[in-house]
Amino acid sequence: MSVSVAVVGATGAVGEIMRQVLCEHDFPFASIKFLASERSAGKAIDFQGKRYTIEPIRPEAFVGVQIVLSSTPASVSRETSPMAARAGAIVIDNSSAWRMDPEVPLVVPEVNADALRNIPKGIVANPNCSTIQMVVALKPLHDLARIKRVVVSTYQASSGKGAKGLFELDAQISALGKGEKVPPVTAHAAQLAGNCLPHDWKLGEDGYSEEEIKMIKETKKIMGDDTIQVSPTTVRVPVRTGHSESINLEFANPITPEQARAALRNAPGVIVLDDYAKGEVPLALNCLGRDETFVGRIRRDPTVANGLNLWVVADNLRKGAATNAVQIAEVLVSRGWLPKK
């Protein structure tokens, strides 16, 4: 089945990766177009050996389009995603605007692809990057022994702030290397080079950052289990790309590290690297350009009954954003769940 596709926010960091993933996955599109803000409209973009003109985001641009892959700020998405849905498209939205809407499925294909059977508003939400990789690792373990509680600390890359975050980190590292004064901070909450930032997101409720609140709420919705308790601490670290997470799990039922490894090895989208003695552990550098979620350091927590510790790593621009969106589109196509044209 070949489909018509539009990529919205095509010139952004995630939009660029979406184009790469569409090519790598040999996505079955019959036609494709690229949309962006008025600032970028009219510019040319190369894709699979052809040159395309970037179109402005407007209602007529979505006529005849079946799948929209959208990566825009939430404020833009609230206007443009319904616009595309009204034209008859299914919108896979990478912003935070729609994630907790009860009529919008929040989907990680390895975890809850069946949620795509019902898309009342014509919009599917792509979860937060840190949540996506975590639930990919949690799902097979939850099925095996039922997770009661998650305590997670994240080590999140600068690219989570987009290109501006990377430029700032690179400039800081360069300045420090030359013994020069570090440029003024504009993208991150404070100097990131040589530092860790536990406050690199807007403050939410009860002293938690908005990023931490997303992990709490999104995990429950994706896993389909409001009883799972999530206690997160999110931290920005001086890494360009690749989010890492230290995860402590408490289960309702007994589970051994060996059982966890076996379940994870058989899980879709997971690669187990868990031989400490040989140095086989998930590393941010090794996950770059990969679509899988890497899991290691699987060991018993001796302080609680039925407890395990994990180390989970993924490319935040790919599985944490662009790849997950494309995989959602692939499920819609392969299972015939797109509206008929």
Image (cartoon, grey):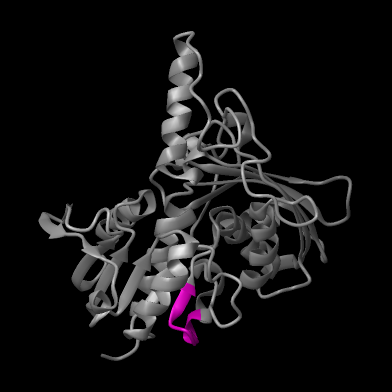
Whether residue 336 is visible here, answered yes or no, is no
- Residue most extreme to the front: 38
Q: Is residue 216 left or right of residue 227?
A: left
Q: Decide whether residue 267 is among the magenta residues.
A: no
* Residue 11 or residue 27, whichever sits in front: 11
Quadrant, the N terminus = bottom left
Whether residue 230 is visible here, answered yes or no, is yes
Q: Position of residue 159 (x, y in %)?
A: 47, 41
* Residue 67 or residue 277, whichever sits in front: 67
Specify the quadrant of the image occupied by residue 96. Answer: bottom right
Q: Position of residue 134 (x, y in %)?
A: 61, 55
Specify the quadrant of the image occupied by residue 244. Answer: top right
- Count up the numbered dots: 0
Q: Which contiguous range is marked in magenta? A: 116-124
Q: In the rendered view, would you say 117 is above or below 221? A: below
Quadrant, the C terminus = bottom left
Q: Position of residue 58 (x, y in %)?
A: 28, 72
- Residue most extreme to the top: 179
- Residue most extreme to the left: 50
Q: In the rendered view, would you say 103 is above or below 284? A: below
* Residue 202 or residue 10, whichever sits in front: 202
Q: Is residue 227 left or right of residue 155?
A: right
Image point (66%, 58%), residue name: 215
Q: Position of residue 7 (x, y in %)?
A: 30, 64
